[in-house]
Amino acid sequence: MSRSGHGLVRPGGSLRRTTRRTWVDRVHWTTPAWLCVVAALMLTVIGLAAIGTTRPELVPKQSAILAIGLLAAALVTWPSHRFLQWVSWPLLVGVVLLLVFLLVPGVPEAIVRPRNGARRWINVIVMDFQPSELAKVAVVLAIATWLRFRRNHRRLRGLLPPLVIALIPMGLVLLEPDLGTALLFLPTAIAMLIAAGARIRDLCIVGLLGLAGAGAMTPLLRPHQRDRIMAMWAQIQGDTTFVDDIGYQGQRAMTLVGAGGLTGYGREQASRLVHWNHLPEEHNDMVFAVIVARWGLVGAVVTWGLFGLMALGGLLVAGQCREAFGRLVAVGATTLLVAQMVVNTGMTIGVMPITGMTLPFVSAGGSSLVAVWLLIGLLLNVGLRPPSRLWREAFEFGPEDDVHG
């Protein structure tokens, strides 16, 4: 008896018959990944309604981008794990080159369009493409590819390569500057290392070193980034020093969140509230404030609940996957989506500094919406496909690994 990708194969010709199975035959349609798809679709609908509250003219464009995102998700759902592993390194190299290109001085503004002093977007005629969004997908695939056959991450020095994979694009994104997106890379890498069996003790050492390094790099932050951190701290303490300056956006968002009450005010009145409160970026970075103004606490809880459903589906996909690469991809994609939601809603309700980060599936924006649907496509890919004939057990370690690891 030998193991195939679909089950046990008897000797004497059955293997040939098994290998002729179609792609559809090898799919496990009953997968918790559908929870992620359903949650993402419902969040996207909420996003279209929230955007339409104040910017109805953007809804057709966002709907068109949604179609592109769904197509992108379908495309990454189709190929095998082997293809995704093969493409991960070229994708990471390409994304790093694009991030470097953004920082090259002298590039015409018709190609790289600075906004508010940040160089994050490349004009591709039909839309502005943000390489940092694709970088999140590339980092997940590259770390999963690196770790899939390795065991040295059970030692402290073995943590260095996967962390470098995350730190290179993270550093380039910081230089754009884009503090919010940069904050997502390390939590994602650490979550994937935990799933791969890295020792918590070693990760704590890395975390302490990272905190020390972050403190040493504080002088390198842009003045407005330091001011936003100070404004958040002052806001928590009840200090109104920054309300009319760098803390204005956060204060306006908190005012709308507080005004929403239990059930909100409906579309028309919520639109007027947002308008007269002069909330900047209400259609993307601060869209959560619009949700609460329109649907109140109920809307906030539903939004958080859908992300919770997505997290549950993603973790179930990871738990059921017995193959190393697929499990790591599921953990990385889920961590990215949930971490981005936490940062966005946290800055809206005043417990985190304003970082200019979108709310996944909800905020207006082309690159962001396509990127998060790519992550859903990866989760669906892992959930639908059983392991191939030659697959490694997903990071099972015994006592000997702790001794020799």
Image: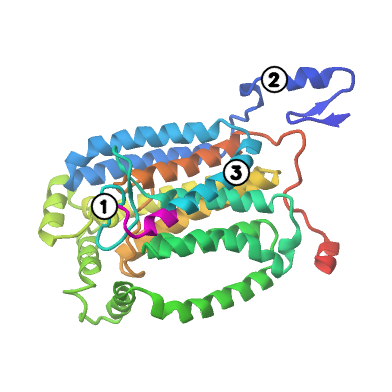
Rate crowding at label 1 as few (under 14), some (14 to 19) or many (20 or more) other CA atoms within 10 Å.
Answer: few
Q: Are marks 1 and 2 in contact (CB under 8 Å)?
A: no
Say which of marks 3 and 2 sits in front.
2
The amino acid pointed to by label 3 is: Val
- The residue under the point 35% across, 55% down is 120
- The residue under the point 39% across, 53% down is 304
Residue holding disc 3: 317
Q: Earlier in the sequence, mark 1 or mark 3?
A: 1
Q: Is residue 13 visible?
A: yes
Alpha carbons under labels 1 and 3: distance apart: 43 Å
Q: Earlier in the sequence, mark 3 or mark 2?
A: 2
From the viewer's side, name the closer residue of 317 and 365. Answer: 365
Residue holding disc 2: 21
Alpha carbons under labels 3 and 2: distance apart: 24 Å
Seen in the picture, residue 268 relative to 239 is either above or below; the reply is: above
Q: Are marks 1 and 3 in contact (CB under 8 Å)?
A: no
Tag shown at residue 109? 1
Horizontal and vertical percent position of residue 62? 28, 39
